[in-house]
C-alpha cells in the first residue's frame, strides 16, 4: 500500500469564493481535512471557510495549537500533530491541511511541515498557495501595493514598534500583519513617521464584521486579531479611494464594513 499525499491548502482571507480552483478541487477529493485550532476552543475559521468545498463525508481532524510562548509545550504539540499526520498518510489516505491565507506565510503549516519531513523524509507534499489577507485588503480599499521600482516590505506587528519603525524607513510601501498585538504602539510609530494618514487598516476581511479604514484615528485601541495595516507610498498623502461608486473619505462596500478618512 502506498502512502497518501499531504496537501497544504491556502484557504485565503475569509471569503469561501477566494479559494483557488485547484484548492477547491483538491478539497472536494481528499478523505481527511486537518484543521489547526487553539487548544482553548474547538473552532477553526479555516474549516468554516472551506466547508462549502469539502467532499461529503470528509473526516475533519482538529490539530491542537496551544496559545503559549513556552517552546517546550509548542514543540511537544507539533511533534504530536506531525505524528498524527504521518499516521494518516501511512494508512494510504490523502489529507489536506487547511490554513488561513497562504500556507507558507505566517502559517501553522510552516510549523508542521519540517516536523513531518523529519518523521517521514519521503512524504509526498503538495502545497497550494492562497490569496493573502493583504491582497484582499488592497482589493477592498483600492490601495496599490507596489509599482514600477518600488519595494514592498512585509512585517509582523508582533515585534517591537521601534524596530518596525526602523525597518519601515527602508520601504516605499509596507504591510504590517498581526497588527492587533501592539496596535497602540504601531499607530504611534506610524504617526511619528508621518505615515498614519497613508495607512489602510483592515480587519476581519471576507467574514462578518469586516471593516476597512483609511487613516488610523478611528481604529479601536484593541482591534480583532485578524487585522493588518497597508502603509501607503512614502512621502505621499494617499489618494482618495473610490469604493462601490463613492469617492471621498467615507464609502460603503456592499456586505462589508466602511472606509473612513482620518
Image (tube, rainbow, N blue to C red):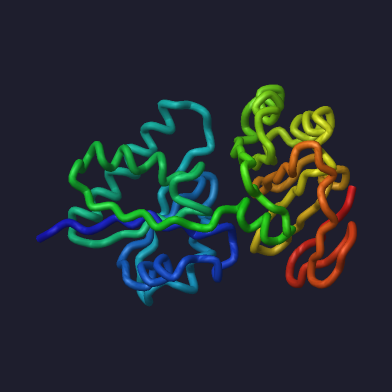
Percent of width and height locating residue 121: 20, 41
Q: Which residue: 48% across, 52% down?
A: 102
Say which residue appears at 71% left-offset and 33% top-offset: 182
Camera-side residue: 40 or 83? 83
Q: Residue furthest left?
A: 1
Q: Is residue 127 left or right of residue 118?
A: right
Reply above or below: 234 against 246: above
List the single residue furthest toward the bottom: 56
Q: Depth check: 96 or 166 in front?
A: 166
Outermost residue, front side: 148
Q: Is residue 197 above or below residue 138?
A: above
| Front position in the image: 22 or 98 | 22
Q: Position of residue 44 (x, y in %)?
A: 52, 56
Image location of residue 256, percent across then percent down: 74, 66
Q: Is residue 178 visible?
A: no
Residue at image position (47%, 66%) is 20
Q: How many circles with numbers are drawn on the protein?
A: 0
Please state if 78 lies on the left or on the right of 178 as rendered: left
Residue 23 visible to the viewer = yes
Find residue 178 and report its image quarter: top right
Coordinates of residue 146 in the picture (x, y in percent):
64, 47
Give the quadrant of the N terminus: bottom left
Rendered residue at 62%/28% (across/down): 159
Amino acid at each position: 500500500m502506498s502512502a497518501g499525499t499531504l496537501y497544504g491548502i491556502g484557504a485565503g482571507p475569509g471569503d469561501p469564493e477566494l479559494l483557488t480552483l485547484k484548492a477547491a478541487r483538491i478539497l472536494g477529493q481528499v478523505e481527511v481535512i486537518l484543521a489547526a485550532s487553539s487548544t482553548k476552543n474547538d473552532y477553526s475559521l479555516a474549516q468554516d471557510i472551506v466547508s462549502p468545498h469539502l467532499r461529503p463525508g470528509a473526516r475533519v481532524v482538529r490539530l491542537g495549537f496551544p496559545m503559549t510562548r513556552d517552546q517546550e509545550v509548542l514543540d511537544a504539540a507539533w511533534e504530536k500533530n506531525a505524528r498524527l499526520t504521518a499516521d494518516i498518510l501511512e494508512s494510504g489516505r490523502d489529507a489536506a491541511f487547511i490554513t488561513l491565507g497562504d500556507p507558507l506565510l505566517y502559517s501553522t503549516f510552516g510549523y508542521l511541515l519540517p516536523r513531518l519531513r523529519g518523521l517521514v523524509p519521503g512524504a509526498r507534499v503538495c502545497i497550494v498557495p492562497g490569496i493573502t489577507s493583504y491582497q484582499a485588503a488592497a482589493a477592498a480599499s483600492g490601495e496599490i501595493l507596489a509599482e514600477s521600482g518600488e519595494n514592498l516590505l512585509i512585517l509582523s506587528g508582533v515585534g517591537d514598534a521601534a524596530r518596525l519603525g526602523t525597518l519601515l524607513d527602508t520601504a516605499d510601501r509596507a504591510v504590517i500583519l498581526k497588527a492587533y498585538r501592539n496596535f497602540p504602539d504601531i499607530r504611534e510609530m506610524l504617526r511619528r513617521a508621518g505615515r498614519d494618514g497613508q495607512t489602510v487598516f483592515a480587519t476581519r476581511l471576507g467574514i462578518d464584521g469586516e471593516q476597512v479604514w483609511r487613516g488610523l484615528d478611528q481604529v479601536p485601541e484593541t482591534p480583532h486579531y485578524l487585522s493588518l495595516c497597508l502603509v501607503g507610498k512614502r512621502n505621499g498623502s494617499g489618494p482618495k479611494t473610490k469604493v462601490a461608486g463613492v469617492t471621498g473619505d467615507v464609502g460603503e462596500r456592499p456586505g462589508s464594513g466602511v472606509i473612513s478618512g482620518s
